Amino acid sequence: MSTLKEAKVGQTVKVKKLNGEGAIKRRIMDMGITKGVEVYIRKVAPLGDPIEVTVRGYELSLRKQDAEMIEVE
């Protein structure tokens, strides 16, 4: 089991599960990140925050804390 935060730049991973509750989970889902969707890691800032990803053709920036809640395979 790994999280989006641990994925490497240039990798495409598939979302397995979203952890977290309420507003945090809703914010992640509002970005189009849901179970089964593929996420491409474009860039990670030097300190690991933010993580820039491409989801469903959209370029997004994720906070490190949010990325830790997204389980991927």
Image: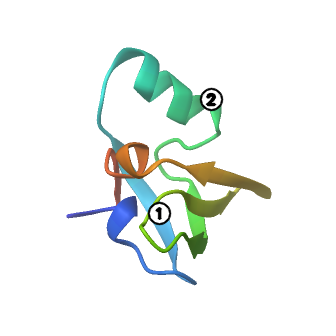
Secondary structure, mark 1, is strand
Instruction: Establish if 19 lies above or below 8.
Output: above
Report the residue at 46% width, 45% height from top. 35
Q: Position of residue 11 (x, y in %)?
A: 52, 81
Q: Position of residue 22 (x, y in %)?
A: 38, 15
Q: Position of residue 16 (x, y in %)?
A: 36, 53
Q: Nearer the viewer, residue 73 or 40?
A: 40
For this view, does 69 lie left or right of residue 66?
Answer: left
Can you tell which of label 1 and label 2 is closer to the viewer?
2
For this view, does 30 lie left or right of residue 14?
Answer: right
- Residue at the spot of label 1: 14
- Tell me the kind of residue under disc 2: Asp
Report the residue at 56% width, 44% height from top. 33
For this view, does 28 lie left or right of residue 6?
Answer: right
- Residue at the spot of label 2: 30
Report the residue at 48% width, 47% height from top. 63
